[in-house]
Image (cartoon, rainbow, N blue to C red):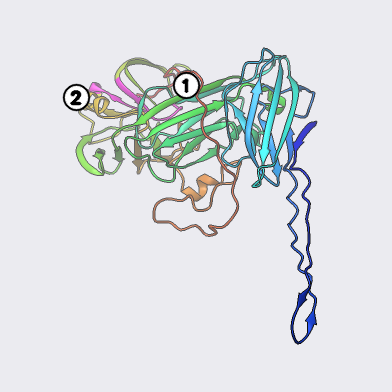
Amino acid sequence: MRVRQRTAGPVIVVAAALPLILSSCTSRTESKSAQQAPPPPPTLSVTPAADARDVPLSAEVGLAVAGGKITGVTLTDGKGSPIDGAMRGDGTSWIPNRPLDPKQAYSVQVTAANDTGQTSTWSSAFTTMAKPTKLQQSTLYFQNNMTYGVAMPVTVSFDPGIPKESRADVQKRLFVTTDPPQPGAWHWDESGKQVYYRAPDFWKTGTKISVRSALTGVPMGKNGYGDADRTASATIGDHVTMEIDNATKEMSVFKDNQLVKKIPVSMGKPSTPTSSGKMVIMEKFETTVFDTRGDPNGGYVVQVNDAQRLTWGGEFIHAAPWSVGDQGERNVSHGCTNVSNANADWLMKNSNVGDLVTIKGTEVTLDPGNGWTAWNMTWDEYVKGSALPVPPDLRPAGEQAANPGAPVAGAPPAGSPTPTAPATPAPAGAGD
């Protein structure tokens, strides 16, 4: 490291003693005026180390300062062009707004100052690694300029799943900001194939959510390196929820917690039951084809209209004119929730991806990870799935933290590179 420090010049202290003559007696005192020596300039510790090579493309400028605070960070590429970035909320690093380029030289300059204006400057250079050849596939299920429901979890999926020892490093590179602020937490499913972000309570209507899945070049152990840096911003729409009760074979639709419509349904018959649990509308199709010929209980191909996916396993809400006589009376489907053409059309017009659907009273319960199951658990269960500490005072409205003074890790702001829309899976393996 090369450290340049600027300090103030020497201070000369002069003490004067003057005799004091009194009429009755004589005494002599010495008064010394001592000026306290100025504090030393700040000390800096910065990573990557000077002249480091093969630095990951996801590198941040790590910062540790004693006796002052960071006042400036500059990162430039080999051509002298500056790289934009921002500090983490906890001040531990400075995050470039885009991935670094492979096999490139970068220069870093960091400045810190103390309360008296003394400064220290750290400057060095490092070189990034070659472009990784083994990449970990990821998908961000959050698209730009969309309107989502109040239960929409920010979801990132991985294939293969992320091992537990790598999840904290991956989670540090997943950034979410909300306007107005509504903090949340991440939760990994057991397989490491999905990680969700949600707040303790539903998003507020009108909230703007910005996401950055900054995974390009993130080391992931035996899985190689992260594949892409994706961003998107979206808005939360109306507060719409649906409740489906197997006892009554009826769906209740609520807007702003007020009942607006009741719809008769037919769900999965006992041999192919519908799952009970809290799930989220994942995608919507005006028309799609269910092909279950590869499933154990399958063997058919059917075109359906106004289909809304609830699980990866193929449970949908959709129009089923062939079962109208059964809707409200008995379950006859292969696991989906059947409604009439008119009701399916109404639901498509009045729902969003991210709306919560609660089903109760069926023969089986929803499996963790079978869809976006971020709401199918209590908050205390949910936060146990985070690979990083969660603030203990971050709880649903009305709940109190057990230990509100415990230390927690800070969360950084989202970056703002060009948004990239995530891939959308085909509706294969659905039940009718």
Query: Left of 340 or right of it: where is 216?
Result: right
Mark 1, residue position: 295
Question: Left or right of 406: which side holds 151?
Answer: left
Q: Outermost residue toward the front?
A: 23
In the image, 382 versus 302, the foreground residue is 382
Q: Please give the range of residues in magenta.
A: 306-322
Q: Quadrant of residue 92?
A: top right
Q: Residues within 10 Å of mark 1 (few under 14, many from 20)?
A: few
User: Whole-percent x and y of residue 299?
Assistant: 42, 17
C-alpha distance separating marks 2 and 1:
30 Å
* Vertical order, 209 against 410 (above or below): above
Give the labeled residue for mark 2. Answer: 342
List x then y, in percent, for residue 413.
Answer: 52, 34
Out of 263 and 133, give the one closest to the viewer: 133
Q: Nearer the viewer, residue 49 or 221?
A: 49
Q: Secondary structure at mark 1?
A: loop
Identify the residue shown where x is 70% and y is 26%.
108
Q: Assign a secondary structure to mark 2.
A: helix
Type of amino acid under label 1: Asp
Give the total of numbered labels. Answer: 2
Whichever of labels 2 and 1 marks the residue nearer the N terminus, that label is 1
Where is residue 13 shown, x and y percent of the image?
78, 55
Whether the magenta-drawn stretch holds residue 312 is answered as yes
Q: Is residue 412 magenta?
A: no
